[in-house]
Image: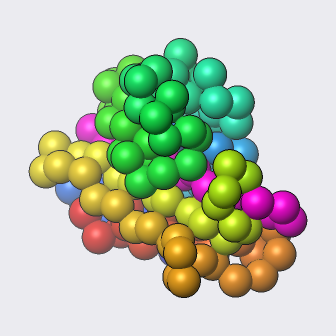
Amino acid sequence: MNAAAADAVRSLAAAGLTVATAESLTGGLVCAVLTSVPGSSAVVRGGVVVYATELKASLAGVPDDLLDRLGPVGAEVAAAMARGVRSRLGADVGVATTGVAGPDGQDGHPPGTVHVAVASPAGTTLRSYAGDDVLPGGRAEVRDATVRAALELLSEL
């Protein structure tokens, strides 16, 4: 995963962009992996772990009505988290993760349901794993795959 993180940091630096993270199921892993790369301080502004639903609103800027309607797991929630952290931390790019790592489901979502979003000046990009396309594996595998998906989206900027 370090190579993917290095690619993401290089891509951001080459574009002159900074990044901030808002993470739920990954609990800060995306930010940790990014900051493990030498030179990442030039691009990483910071991150917030918004594991509790109400923190998605208060720290990541997700509208309360969206959380009331969808709950904490959803593509629109991930997109709002990415846009919110981008704004609140003063970054060019926001990346967000939300979902269900398992072992149990949550609010009708099975384990492996994951939504990753990247918000940039060009717009918001989403990658979702839901329905018949959930991420396989146990809790650790789902979280690792989510980090890889976030890094891939960042590298595509």
The residue at the point 56 percent across, 48 percent down is 73
Instruction: Identify the image quadrant of the N terminus.
Output: bottom right
Rendering quarter of residue 63:
top left
Rendering quarter of residue 61:
top left
| Left or right of 62 in this view: 22 | right
Q: Is residue 94 magenta?
A: yes
| Left or right of 122 in this view: 71 | right
Instruction: Identify the image quadrant of the C terminus.
Output: bottom left
Q: Locate residue 62, reporting x and y percent.
A: 43, 28
Q: Is residue 36 in view? A: no
Q: Locate residue 93, reporting x and y percent.
A: 32, 43
Rendering quarter of residue 86:
top left
The residue at the point 13 percent across, 51 percent down is 122
64 relative to 2, above or below? above
The residue at the point 66 percent across, 57 percent down is 108
Q: Locate residue 87, reporting x and y percent.
A: 32, 25
152 relative to 157, above or below? below
Q: Is residue 72 magenta?
A: no
Q: Is residue 73 in view? A: yes
121 relative to 88, above or below? below
96 relative to 109, above or below? above
Question: Which residues make up the magenta segment?
Answer: 92-105
The residue at the point 48 percent across, 51 percent down is 74
Residue farthest along the top direction in this orientation: 58
Q: Locate residue 58, reporting x and y percent.
A: 53, 16
